[in-house]
Each structure stands twice: as C-alpha cells, then as structure tokens.
Amino acid sequence: MSLTAHPAPVDWQKASYVAAQAADSRINVELETEGMVLNIGPQHPATHGTLRIVVRLDGEEVVWAEPVCGYMHRGYEKLTEVRTYPQVTTLINRIDWLGHFANEVPFILGAEQLMEVEAPPRAQWIRTIFFEMARIANITLFLGDMGVQLGALTPVFYAFRDREYVLNLMEAATGGRFHPNYDRIGGLKEDLPRGWVDECHGAMRKVRDFCDQLEDLLMGNEIFQTRTRGIGVIPASVGLDYGLSGANIRASGVDWDLRRDEESPLAWKEVDFKVWTHPDGDSFARYWVRLQEVREAASIVQQLLDGLPSGPIMSKVPKIIKVPAGEVWHHTENPLGEMGYYIVSQGGLGPFRCKIRSASFNNVSILPWLLKGVYVPDVITILASLYFILGDIDR
Amino acid sequence: MTALPLLAIELAWWQATAIKVGAVLTVIPIGSLILVYVFLFKMMSHMQSRLGPMEAGPHGSLQVLAEAGKFLQKEDIFPARADRAVFAMAPVVVIVSTFILYAVIPAGPDLIVEDLDVGIFFALAVSSVSVIGILMAGWSSGSKYSLLGALRATGQLIAYELPLVLAVVGVVIQAGTLSLQGIVAAQAEGEIFGFGLIGNPFIFTQFVGFVIFLVAAQAELTQTPFDMPIAESELVAGYMTEYSGFRFLFFFIAEFGTAFALAGIASTLFLGGWYVPFLPDGLLANLAGPAVLGVKIMFVAFLIFWMRFTFPRFREDQLQALAWKFLIPLSLANIAVTAVLKVVM
Amino acid sequence: MSSPETPSSQEAPEEAAASEESAPEEAAAPEQADPARQALIDGLRSKLGDGFIASEIVGGDLWVRVDVSAWRTAVETAKTELGMDYFCFLSGIDWLPNPSLSGREVWDPNPNEASEPVAEGGQMQTGIAGGDTRFQVFARLYSTRAHVGITLKADLDDENPTVPSITSVYRGADWHEREAWEMYGFNFEGHPGLRHIYLPGEFEGHPLRKDFPMLAREVKPWPGLVDKEQIPGEDEPAEEEAASS
C-alpha cells in the first residue's frame, strides 16, 4: 500500500546500490573485512604529475574512487583576461605540454575568425604540419609510457629516442622544443628553415618504424594483452555522456574526428587519411587507436610536405591586435581529444573571457564511474590508457 | 669438511668456518654488484638505446661502488608510524636468507661451504625465509603501499615456491640424490644416447623443468613480469617504499644476491654446474670450476634480466592463475613422465 | 545592471540591441542558409515555449538563450530529441566590465578612443544572444553524428545565481558544475556534491568573477601591457625617440 502511494519516483540506481550493499554486508558478517582508503598521489609515479586519486579498497578491489585535481591549477582562464591576445599563446602552450603547438592553434583560429583575418595557405599548411607533429610528439610518449605503467621499461626509451627527431625539427623551425609559441594571429612567426622538409621526411619514416617496433615489442605481447583487454571498458553512450573525446571515444566505436568532420581553415581537407575506430572500448582499444593515429599523423605530415605551397606566411594584420567584439567557439582535434576555446571579446586588446575546454578534464571525469570494481593494478592501466596530461586537467 | 684439501692444509674447524663465512660475505656483494653493473646498468641501457653510466671508471664500471657509497651515506629514516624494531630487522632477515643460500652451492669439487645430503632441499627451504623479512618490512613500515606490496609478495612467493620445488623434483629423480654435488656428479657421468664424453647436462632431459624453474625463479626474485610486490608504477616501491640508506641497500643486495644464487642453482641443476669435461678432480678443477660456473650463472642471469627488461608485468590474479593452472600441472606432468621413464629405461 | 529578472517584458529590446551591436548583417542572412541549425532552433522553441528567449547564428555556429527555469528542460531536449549526444563543457560568464588593474588605464593604449567599453566605466556589454543580468551560465553540446553544436545560455540572478543542475542529463556536467560553482559561485540545484575541485577547501571568494581582486596586478601592472606601448613603428613616442637618438 505504501509502495503504490510512494510520492517520489524510485531512484533505481540508488535502490540497486542499496540492495548490493545489503547483500555485501550479509557476506561481510562472515568474512569481516575492513575497507582501506589508499591515497594514490599527488606524488605517485603512475599519475604523471600531481593528480591524486583517493580509492577505498577491499583487498585489492576498488570499491570507490574519487580523483582530486587542482594541484597544478594555474588559473589560466583568469590570466587570459589580463593579457593581450599575442601574449595568451605563451600561456596556453603550457596546457598540454606534450602537444604544445596544438594548443595554440584553436585559440589563434578563434581569434582570426573574430577578426575576419585568414592566414595565407602556406601558413595554414605549416600549421597543420606542426599540429600533426605535436600529435606525434604527444602520442609517441603515451605509447611508450603505457609500457612503463605496465612494468615494461624498455618501450619508453624508444619513444623518447624517436620523439627527439620530431622535437629537434620543432626546435629548428620554432626555437622551442616544448613551448614553440610559433603561431601568430594571421600567420606564423617564421618560415621553415632550409632543408627542413627533407629532414622531416626522414623523421616521419623513423616515427613509422617506431610504430612497427612497438607493435611487435609491446602491443603483440601476451602479457600486455591480458593486462589491457577487457579492462576499463567504456560504452560509447557513457563516454559521450562524460564528454570523452579523441582516441578515448574513438576506441569505443564512435567515428568522430574533428579533423575530418568539421570545416577548418587548416589543410586537413587536402590530405587523405583514415580515422581509426575500435569497437571494444577497453584499454587495449585505446592503445591500438592511438598507435594507428601516430601512423596516420606521420602520413599526413608527409603528404603535406609534398604539397607544401609557396607564398607568404603572414597576412596583413595590425601591429596592435584588437579583436572586434563578439563570441566564438573554436575547437580542434588535439592529441588528447577535443580542445576548444570559447573566446568572448569586447573589442579590447585581450579576451574578455576565455573558457578553455581541455580534453583531459572531461576524460578524467569518468574515473569515478570507471574505477568501481577494478583491481589496483587495473587502476594504473586505466589511468595510463585514458592518457591525461595534468596541465590539461588543471589548466 | 673441516679441511680444505686442495691446499693440503689441515685447518681447525673455526678457521675453516671463518674462511667460509668470509668467502660467502665477499661473494654476495661482488656477485650482486657484477649483476647490477653488467645487466642493470649496461645491458639494460644498451637494450634501451642509451649508454648507461659512463663516467665513473672505465665504461662506468665503478658506478656501482659510487651507488653503494651513496646509499651508505644516506640518512637511515624511520617512519613515524613504523614499528622500529621490526622495521630495522626486516632487511637483515632478507639478506640472511640470501646469505644461507650460498652455503650449499658448489663451485668446484671441494669449493662448497657445506655439502649437505639434502642440499637442494635446504636451498629451496631457506630461500623462502626472505618472505618473512618482506612481510616484516611491509607490515612494520606503517604504509599502505608497503603493506599491499608485502601481501602481494607473500602470496606470490608462496604460489611460486611450488612450481620451483616441483621443477627440481624431476632433476632429483633423474639424479637420484638431493645433494648438489651429487647432482653435478650425476650430470658429469650421464650419457646422451651412449655418448658420455661431455656428460649430460639435465637441460636436455629436463628442459620443461628448466623453463619452469626459470619462470618460478623470476617470480621468486620478484622481477618483471612478476614484480607486483615492487611494481613501481602502482605501489611506488612496494615493501621497500619506506626504506632508505643502508637498509634499502640490504634489500637491493639481497635481491641481486638471490638472483645470483638462484642462477647458480639453476646452472648446477640443469647446466652441469662447475663440471669441466676431461678435467680430473683436483686443484685444476677447483680453479676452473668457479669460472665455468660463473659463465653459466651469467648466462642464466642474462635470461632472467632479458625477460625483466622486455616484458610488462602481470596482474596479481593473473600471476596466481599462471602458477596454479599452468605451471604446477605442467611440472606435475613433468615429474610423472620423468618417473615413468626412470623406471622404464 | 542588477535588475531582477523579468523574462517576458524585457527580452525583445535587449535581443534586438544585442544583435544590432554584435553582428547586424549576419543575424538575418545565414539563418535561412542553415537548415540544420534552424531545425534545432525550432525544436527548442516548440518545446520550451516561453522559456526560449533568443537565438542567433553567427559565423556558422548557433547560440540559444533560455530562461533559467527552462535550463534543464532545454538541455534534456537537446540530448533526447535533437541528438546532442556529446557534452562538451559548461561554464559561466561574468559580464561586469574588466576592472582597471592599476592606478592608470592599462587596458587602453589610446584613452581618447570612444569605442573602448572599459573607458566608459561600468557599462555592461553582453555578447551573442544577449543577456539581462550580470551572470550567465552557458553550456556547449554537440552531436557527433550530425556534427552540429549548440551553445545554450541562461541568465542568472545577480545576488543569488541559482540554476538547476544537469548532472542527471549529462553525467560529465558534474565536474564542470563544480568548477563553475567554485569559480563563479553559481549554485547548482540538485548537484550531488558541490565541493571545491581546483581550489583548496578553505578558499574564499569566486576567482573568475570580475570583481575578484588580482592583487598582484593591482599593485603592479602586468609588464607586458607596458611593453606594448613601445612597439616601434606604431607608437609615435617610440619613433620620435628612435629618430632623436
């Protein structure tokens, strides 16, 4: 009687949770175990930075997990409000410090859209090349680092070795290995140095060799597969609900890549590339998709190098850049996922408000859901396979 | 053996004991330092396309001494919540277990600390004593990571003790003795299809046993792919997390000393030990024996470290599944086949 | 600027003003040229009724402003009926003018120029799709199949910015709402746990509000802003100096 007259709708999630707890407690009367709260981080080797994850363990099984971020929060959204547009690129280089250049591009493109300025084709082409090189520099490290997280020490050194070729080229053209600060509103800082294109071809071949090597050394390894297959499965609908993007959601079978699907002034439409997806949604799928992405990126760079147009690299922009009033949202497919800037301008020298949408923030927000019921070693596998950069979470 | 006949000198018991203790005390650090330098510093670096230490000594060969010196200088830290007595004792327990292990490994016809009749049984028994030390370390540290690491280590070492012992049983059946000197002699006198000149290292007949022994030894040593007790990406350093200075050095030396000893046992059981064909027992064999054994030890250790630097690590339940569902049945089958063949042939 | 919200009466002039000042020619032209986005507008308008306040298509992107009471319904409609399966972000805007960060006018290189909004002092200027109050919450939703996105906005009360939580619609909104709560002081009704996400637990104030003091900047202006006045070629004083020396 009281059931039928229940005023509020039944929260089934809560009800099933309560039922599960009750069932657990019945068992636990006999095997009395006490939960243990374990603090993974903020100074822990697996969190590559300062992420802290509080997990409650039953034995080695995670009962409850809560990521705590903010140890690296630098307040970039506030800082952009007291900087001019060209100064902002210096800051945002440091958001995803492995995909350095890729952070600058959506901001610059957004500002260009507000100013109704377009960079010349050569600049767009070179931007795309550097964007993909940033992707390679970023993801190759992931490919090696995943091995370290799973206990294989060697792959990460191969990653550092072959990543160096890409970073050297970056440095040759931009002057910065980690923070190139190369993109300008209306074009680029400088043109490519002589001989750069040939060297870049060589580096891309090395990157592909690296991919083959890792496929043999790590991905084909049975232990690697038992550790990653079926671990941390994200269904597509849940992933989209949490706003997962990039390789994380493509590994769940969502065929969505902003490089292909959205109009962009960059040169992706000029090249032929495949967007890889994987139906499984587990850690292995995420690794697999990223490995293919590096290959595709190398292929994109090579195609672009072959068709690189000549011409100026800077269009006509005023010396003091003022962006007309308006709002714009520009997003690109960054190494870690969708990255975008919501720029509100009121005609001043700097942004009035700049909302930075970084991929890792959303990618990590799924952790409380994903980590329930896994073992401690799988926590590390899942963290590594989701692939976050701390600066990209905390901004 | 209260005398060292090779020198034709009669020594008092205490003199002989002092010499033996001294020898073992030298062999453990030297053995582990060699392993650390050759494999951990150099082989690993070259596998990873880097040079490793190059500055101290020729090709960085004195770097190990610098590292040891560094650890000795460091402060001996006790965590606030540690059980001080147990915490201090744990590394000693672990290193003593390694220390005793060397007592039964023969390096020549007379170069053995104690030729026990149950030598291999003794060796496997004392090698498990280190579990107690590890559990002490993990529990007394007052750290959750240490505790998790210690519990994992305990579960793992107990699980892999079984295949280790069972792999050895095949050899014991074939040799008909538990004495390590007896096993060496059995291999020296063995024949391969009637061809008895170079003896018959048991690796040919007991290859399955050799592989199982190596895998189980890898787990006993907590080396990758079985390094969950340490698992630096999960548990920071497992049961060693809270240790510093010379206590950490103890753990470190024990780890590599045990690797050296287990490689020695594997060489003795499967590769013919110190035996050199055509060389009669005597002074020459006593001199050549350690060299031959050393080469074999380096080969086995190479296999161990090669696996360590190449593979990712298992998860704890996968490791247990591998031990109980695969290695133990396989070693039991190996024993059965060996026993049948022994009777039939 | 702190007038309480009265949706029906004040919307029309505001909207007209906003579209006039931000994008006069674009407001009309692309709306017909964009059937996919027009369908979204129609879908939301038919579902929300009075809650639908304004919409605008600028530069190939869609903005819709809804009443705060219709906020959750709008998000739910977008997800279930309009195919917005992907949650991009949620955040807030404080439309108070940028504060002057030093004793002098560091934000304006040329104080005589009349078009500078800051120089006018305290005049709020809102963005696309308009706005009546100081605070706005906005969220970006996207369809990974149709590749169309929508920015939803809602005005919040100045004194008590309260908005229904959308965590039950998009689970990913959890952290974003915690961030907006922390940075702007928005109160998300129905959120499972509004805790600090970036800042330490005892932090006071809401840093992204425009009136949150940036003490370091108020004491000493950002040196970069001083530098920009001496770019050679553009600034007369710099050129004169160069010529005289």
Image (cartoon, rainbow, N blue to C red):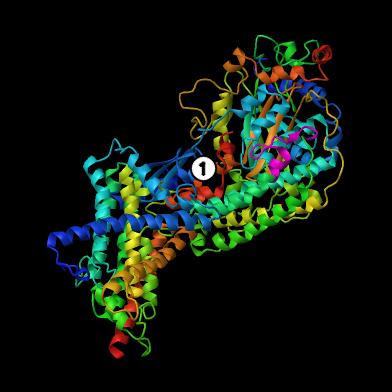
Q: Above or below — where is A326 with respect to A4?
A: above
Q: Above or below — where is B131 with respect to C116?
A: below
Residue assigned mark 1: A48
Residue at the extreme front: B8
Residue A213 x, y percent position in the rendering? 60, 60
Nearer to us in this view, A293 or A67? A293
Residue under the image location 44 percent in, 48 percent down: A16
Residue under the image location 51 percent in, 60 percent down: A224
SS category of the residue bearing label 1: loop
The question of residue A180 being in magenta is answered with: yes
Residue B113 x, y percent position in the rendering? 22, 65
- Kind of residue at disc 1: His
Quadrant of residue C84 within the rendered picture: top right
Which chain's residue wears label 1?
A: A
Residue C169 x, y percent position in the rendering? 59, 40
Residue B220 appearing in the image? no
Identify the magenta region. A169-188
Left/right placement of residue C27 relative to residue A42 reads: right
* Label 1 crowd (10 A; few <14 / some 14-19 / many >=20): some
Nearer to us in this view, B327 or B122? B122
Nearer to us in this view, A366 or B236? B236
Q: Above or below — where is B297 with respect to A99?
A: below
The question of residue C140 being in magenta is answered with: no
On-image quarter of the C terminus of chain B: bottom left
On-image quarter of the N terminus of chain B: bottom left
Q: Above or below — where is A110 with respect to A319?
A: below
Residue C200 appearing in the image? yes
Residue A131 x, y percent position in the rendering? 71, 44
